[in-house]
Image (tube, rainbow, N blue to C red):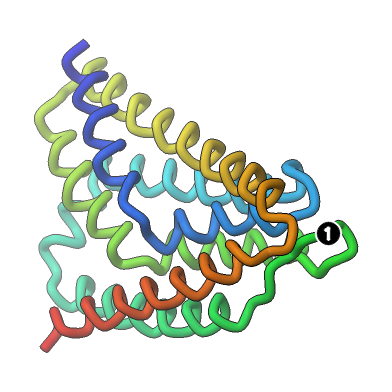
Amino acid sequence: MEAIIHGIILAIGLILPLGVQNVFVFSQGATQPRLRSALPATITAAVCDTLLILLAIFGLSIIVLQFEWLRLSLMVIGILFLLYMGYSIWRSEPTTSITSKALPMSKQILFALSVSLLNPHAILDIVGVIGTSALKYVGSERIYFTVACIVVSWIWFFGLTIAGTVIKRLDGKGKLMVIFNKSSALFIWGTAIYLFSGLM
């Protein structure tokens, strides 16, 4: 039971802060014409988190934390991607009807993969925090801990998608989404600058 509670609390603590991945999943719920149309982004983000959690718990954390060049490479690639992602979100227009342009399934999956696997914050958090925390447990307790982290991740991403859909219905003209997109872009650029300052 301790392992399950620990996994739930830890996963919630890491996933709740507004990040690039959360922003993207929420935005798909808000811009797609139907909830099911946003599911490719939701499921891809959840699968990527599941993969990172499994890799972190079963050894990746030890590798990444031992090689400084690997950590720096992840940071540089992530910074460049965040700059591009912020630019894309800043220029995006809100979708307010079924006929409006929304990301197709292939682009949703590609962007979700990018914000999940090229996001140095997410990787370092999962690898550094969840991976090292899992070392405390062995056998079935480690499995319980792992499952708890994964379940929280899936529930959170589906919740974000639903929240985006609800906001869209309350914001028929898309004014809130314009503000949300601009704020998200600024946040993402700020994250990139913060990460870059850590390299100096």
Residue 98, given in percent of the width and then of the height, sits at: 86, 57
Query: What residue did someone put label 1 on?
Result: 97
Q: Quadrant of the C terminus?
A: bottom left
Along the viewing direction, whichever of 27 and 112 lies nearer the viewer: 27
Q: Is residue 78 above or below residue 22?
A: below
In the drawing, does residue 34 fall left or right of residue 156?
A: right
In the image, farthest residue toward the bottom: 200
**Nearest the camera: 97 or 160?**
97
As displayed, is residue 159 above or below residue 77? above
Residue 104, position in %: x, y? Answer: 77, 63
Question: Could you tell me if residue 149 is visible in this image?
Answer: yes
User: What is the quadrant of residue 197 in the picture?
Assistant: bottom left
> Is residue 127 rendered to the left or right of residue 33?
left
Q: Is residue 114 above or below residue 9?
A: below
Q: Mark 1, residues whose alpha carbon is within 10 Å: few (<14), some, or many (≥20)? A: some
Q: Please identify the quarter of the rendering in which residue 22 is found.
A: bottom left
Residue visible at 76% across and 65% down in the picture: 102
Q: Left or right of 6: which side holds 16?
A: right
Q: In this orientation, does residue 40 appear?
A: no
Q: Amino acid at mark 1?
A: Ser
* Residue depicted at 80% across the width and 53% down the height: 33
What residue do we see at 73% from left, 43% from top? 35
- In percent of width and height, residue 118 lies at 41, 69
